[in-house]
Amino acid sequence: MLPAIVIEKLPRLVRAIRLLPGRVKDEEAEILADELAGITAMVAEKFTNDRTAEGIQRALLLTVGGVSLGLEHAVGEGTDEAALDYLVENGAEHTFRAGFRLIRELAALPEDTLLGEYDDDPVYVQRRLKELFADICTADPGETWSGYERYLGQRKQRQQVYAIVRAAEWLRDHHWEGPIDEPDLNAEGVIALAVIFAVEGGGRIVARAGQKEFERFVASVRKNKPDFEAGWAELMARIPASHQPVIAERIANYRDNCTVLQKIGTKASMKALFADLENYAGSELEADYY
């Protein structure tokens, strides 16, 4: 069996700099070098440690990655020649700032559908930004770098999480008893409650539930035997188009896999149904469950 072919893919900044001889004037190369040195000094001061050799070395790696990220975003599938032209025309500092802005915007997106009051704490936000910057933009000039691909992967993942969070926030704002305004959010739990309770019909949005409300719901479904699909259609009719894909995906999943809905028409005890509901709703259940 033939060995896998490893394709070297150095950071885009390194690949562009290799093209400097013969393509760029000496004074333009000097300006570029001065800018890169200035960026490294700034990164060492703000993100690593400008008083140690190790801190300066780490700052250099972050500078290479930050500028490379900006270049990758600017030229896309373009050639290294195009990257060099962009770098010379716009400057290394502008390119680095563009790359760092991508990191800052990425850090602002939630990693998880579980949110707490400390997620917006300035100290935590800054630490999260630094960690993400180091994770994606640490780029050794002599080694293959996949930071841009990892950035794209994380952005896609976090945008999906953000869509779930936004849908849950909308459901909370339109809860049938009035808006729920709390910093802690279990987005999947909110959506689970809304989808499960929707089968009763009537289009009422349930984003939070307690024991009494759940018992009433179970009794109603067992007595009236509503059409689950009709109930979900009523819910979807109330959901804004921007949030419908998230809710529709959960409905499709719960249609075949939700144990609460599978057992609700059987002789399963209320205690057993409560336990199943907790698996879906988690912290979004009201305290009267306990």
Image (cartoon, rainbow, N blue to C red):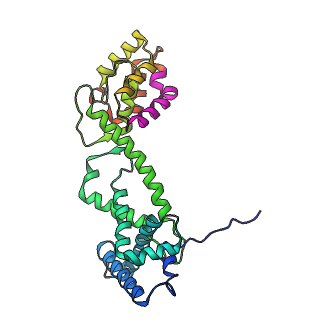
Name the image quarter holding residue 28.
bottom left
Name the image quarter holding residue 73.
bottom left
Outermost residue on the top side: it is 223
Residue 178, horizontal then vertical, whole percent: 22, 29
Residue drawn where x is 25% and y is 60% of the image: 123
Q: State yes or no: residue 247 in magenta.
A: yes
Can you say whether 219 is above or below 49 in the image?
above
Residue drawn where x is 29% and y is 51% of the image: 119
Outermost residue on the right side: it is 1
Residue 159, horizontal then vertical, whole percent: 40, 49
Residue drawn where x is 38% and y is 80% of the image: 36
Can you say whether 245 is above or below 82 in the image?
above
Q: What stretch is highlighted in magenta?
A: 240-262
Residue 119 visible in this rendered orientation of the protein: yes
Image quarter where the C terminus lies is top left
Residue 247, horizontal then vertical, whole percent: 41, 33
Image quarter where the N terminus lies is bottom right
Residue 14, horizontal then vertical, whole percent: 49, 77
Residue 60 visible in this rendered orientation of the protein: no
